[in-house]
Image (cartoon, helix red, strand yellow):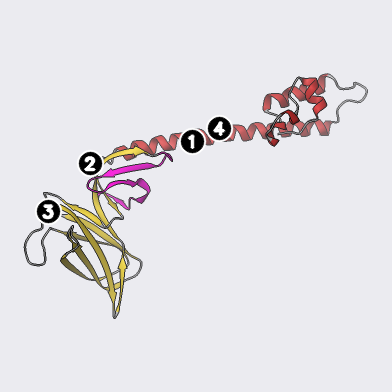
Amino acid sequence: MTQISPELLDRLGLSRPEQKQDKDMDRLGQSDFLKLMTTQLENQDPMEPMDNGDFLGQMAQFSTVTGIEELSKSFQQLAQSLGQNQTLQAASLVGKDVLVPVEFGELGPDGMVKGAVDLDRSTEELQIDVYSPNGERIRRMNLGAAGSGLQEFSWNGMRDDGTFAPPGVYEFKATARSGTQSEAVDTFLDARVESVAVGNDSGLALTVQGLGEISFSDVRRIGG
């Protein structure tokens, strides 16, 4: 945009900058810029015409302004299109399982909970503990040595005493042991997507069975 004097604004019938509270309101839009340049050409002194360099400079500035605004519109359209495509893709997740970073998983009628841990380095022993809703540890699964990366596990609902736990929500904790050192690691569990919604921040939110709402950006894997 171009700064202009109050006198020129008065001649063109435009408001003065000091009449605007916003400091940036003294800048011209595209239509005002074109009107100003046309008026300058119509009223220039034939004996002292506008310097070619000044004229070309104004044209270049006008082209730059126009290009920036057109580019901004293109980016807005692209962002809208990408958002719509993402929403359509996320809608196809309804009824599918996604791997999400949670510690609580629902043991359903089929009697199976699947999950994984993401190790940043190898470990001599990977251990998964399952806790009942009242906080009692009911199962310990030793998965042995494991390398770095995503390590899968599953629980069929069986307790350490050989009996099967009833359907419900259970807590899973993972521990990586190497020598005398042990470290708690984050767990990821499979959950069924029930619905998809667009949040207030235009981000996608998934409602998963037994866990409530989670952000689509937290999904580690789809299916499996």
Q: Quadrant of the N terminus?
A: top right
x and y, in percent, of residue 96 in the image: 24, 44
Which residue is tagged 4?
Answer: 73
Give the number of the mark in front: 1 or 2: 2
Secondary structure state at the residue bearing disc 4: helix
Looking at marks 2 and 4 on the same chain, the residue that comes earlier in the sequence is marked by 4
Q: Is residue 210 left or right of residue 24?
A: left
Give the number of marks.
4
Looking at marks 2 and 3 on the same chain, the residue that comes earlier in the sequence is marked by 2
Distance from label 3 to label 4 (Cα)? 53 Å
Is 95 rendered above or below residue 218? above
Distance from label 4 to label 1 (Cα)? 9 Å
Which residue is tagged 2?
Answer: 95
Which residue is tagged 1?
Answer: 78
When asked about the image quadrant of residue 185, the answer is bottom left
x and y, in percent, of residue 125 in the image: 24, 73
> What is the three-letter code of the residue carrying label 1?
Leu
